[in-house]
Amino acid sequence: QVRLVESGGDLVQPGGSLRLSCAASGGIGSIDDMGWYRQAPGKQRELVAVITSGGRINYADSVKGRFTASRDNAKNTMYLQMNSLKPEDSAVYYCNARVRPLTTARMYDLWGQGTQVTVSS
């Protein structure tokens, strides 16, 4: 069964950095777009960054210049380097990917379980 697993969330002081990882596993045929989303308490889930299969990256305006998304297709893994963190970046960060399992031609829209990022002094 294909799944996504995030890691790297933590408590960090304002101005600090964190690196999140999202690993896809379980009989993967191919992965199309991959993205990072976040959801703070009482707010809707919002897009942070999306990476197309061709490597094009789009960022939310709120994180441009501070966050860098990347992916390693050989490892089926995506990363989010977060610098100059602010308290308003605090949220549960989710990984999303469109994945085709080895056993089918169909694409599935998958989500990870989320990882908590808290920015506080």
Image: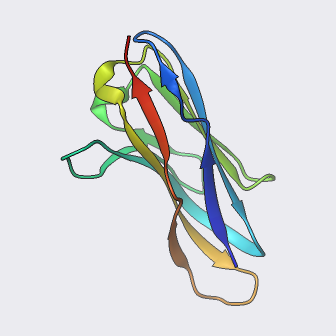
User: With respect to residue 84, does 71 lie above or below?
Assistant: below
Identify the residue at horizontal 41%, vertical 28% (top origin).
118
- List x then y, in percent, for residue 98: 54, 68
Q: Which residue in the rendered view is the most extreme toward the left?
A: 42
Q: Residue 61 appears in which quarter of the rendering?
A: top left
Quarter in which the C terminus is drawn: top left
Question: Which of 75/121 is in front?
Answer: 121
Which quadrant holds the N terminus?
Answer: bottom right
**Residue 63, horizontal then vertical, whole percent:** 36, 28
Tally the numbered discs. Answer: 0
Residue at image location 64% in from the left, 68% down from the top: 3
Q: Nearer the viewer, residue 23 or 104?
A: 23
Horizontal placement of 62 versus 93: left or right?
A: left
Q: At x 31% / y 21%, what residue is drawn?
A: 87
User: What percent of the width, then of the height, locates residue 108?
Assistant: 53, 78
Viewed as shown, does residue 10 lie left or right of 30? left
Give above or below for 120 relative to 9.
Answer: above
**Is residue 60 or residue 5 the one in the foreground?**
5
- Relative to 42, is 88 above or below? above
Q: Judge whether 90 appears above or below 99 on screen.
A: above
Furthest residue in direction bottom, as rendered: 104
Image spot of residue 90 (x, y percent): 35, 31
Q: Residue at x 43, y 20 (%)?
A: 66
Residue 3 left/right relative to 89: right
How is this picture coloured? rainbow
